[in-house]
């Protein structure tokens, strides 16, 4: 038992660097959305922190981890604050350049946080359903909260396939198919690759709209 927990801890430590990258990407993403909505500097920091840490908070509540464990990640808070301050001070031209590669860094954060969420739930012996939810919410929860606070429709639920990749990562870990460090690194790369393929090829889940086209509606009225 101790050996298994140690292996999980080592795997999670390996993803520390990816967590830093993901935290920076999500924090800056939230800050940019706040600036697009013309929020003041307080709003920029609030939206950035919510994007970077909101998913982890929701995950902890659902799988029974103490929410206060978030405060042990003080170095990530400092990194997020520095990243948001830099984003707030950067010229608009530089921010536009960042946004061109935003999808890639966002995919890194999605992959790292989804895997870590699944590892947390697996460590606590939760069922597969909980592992899936933990992986998904850790990866996309912050983005959903960000969009809601910004008065937008959550992009992760309407744009290219996003949450599905986090859930598939959780499924693989929950079923115990991939356990070793190299296997988890492979999964990390796979999730990033599929997310970027979704962006490039515009892969989307099936959707149904209840809005009736005005021209079609007028034609139907004309026939009657």
Image (spheres, helix red, strand yellow):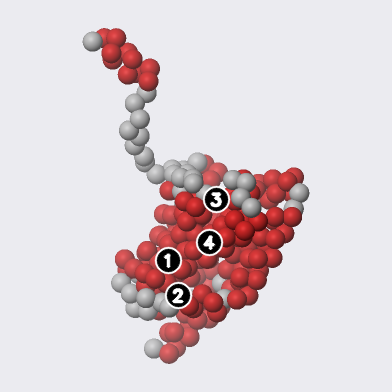
Q: Secondary structure at mark 1?
A: helix
Task: From the viewer's perspective, tell me whether residue 86 is left or right of residue 115.
Answer: right
Label 1 to label 3, Cα distance in Å?
26 Å
Q: Are marks 3 and 4 in contact (CB under 8 Å)?
A: no
Instruction: Classify 27 as above or below 3.
Output: above
**Other residues around mark 2 within 10 Å, as few (<14) / some (14–19) / many (≥20):** few
Label 1 to label 2, Cα distance in Å?
9 Å
**Hey, which quadrant is residue 117 in on the image?**
bottom left
Q: Are marks 4 and 2 in contact (CB under 8 Å)?
A: no
Label 4 to label 1, Cα distance in Å?
11 Å
Q: Secondary structure at mark 2?
A: helix
Q: Earlier in the sequence, mark 4 or mark 1?
A: 4
Residue 130, position as x, y percentages in the image: 34, 68
Of 155 and 181, which appears nearest the observer? Answer: 155
Tag 2 residue? 67
Tag 1 residue? 58
Tag 4 residue? 50
Residue depicted at x 57% and y 63%: 49
Q: Are marks 1 and 2 in contact (CB under 8 Å)?
A: no
Task: From the viewer's perspective, tell me whether residue 206 is left or right of residue 105.
Answer: left
Instruction: Name the front one of labels 3 and 4.
Output: 4
Residue 105, position as x, y percentages in the image: 61, 57
Can residue 176 be spotted in the picture?
no
Label 3 to label 4, Cα distance in Å?
24 Å
Instruction: Name the front one of labels 1 and 3.
Output: 1
Q: Earlier in the sequence, mark 1 or mark 2?
A: 1
């Amino acid at each position: 038992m101790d050996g298994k927990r140690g292996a999980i801890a080592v795997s999670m430590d390996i993803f520390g660097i990816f967590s830093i990258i993901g935290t920076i990407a999500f924090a800056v993403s939230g800050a940019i959305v706040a600036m697009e909505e013309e929020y003041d500097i307080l709003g920029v920091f609030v939206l950035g922190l919510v994007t970077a840490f909101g998913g982890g908070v929701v995950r902890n509540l659902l799988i029974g981890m103490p929410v206060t464990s978030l405060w042990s990640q003080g170095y990530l808070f400092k990194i997020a604050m520095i990243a948001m301050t830099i984003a707030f001070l950067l010229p608009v031209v530089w921010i536009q350049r960042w946004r061109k590669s935003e999808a890639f860094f966002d995919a890194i954060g999605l992959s790292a946080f989804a895997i870590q969420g699944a590892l947390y739930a697996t460590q606590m012996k939760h069922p597969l359903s909980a592992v899936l939810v933990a992986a998904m919410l850790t990866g996309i929860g912050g983005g959903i909260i960000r969009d809601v606070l910004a008065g937008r429709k959550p992009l992760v639920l309407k744009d290219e396939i996003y949450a599905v990749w986090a859930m598939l990562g959780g499924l693989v870990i929950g079923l115990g198919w991939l356990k070793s460090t190299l296997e988890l690194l492979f999964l990390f790369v796979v999730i990033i690759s599929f997310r970027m393929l979704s962006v490039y090829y515009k892969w989307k889940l099936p959707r149904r709209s209840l809005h009736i086209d005005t021209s079609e509606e007028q034609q139907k009225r004309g026939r009657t």
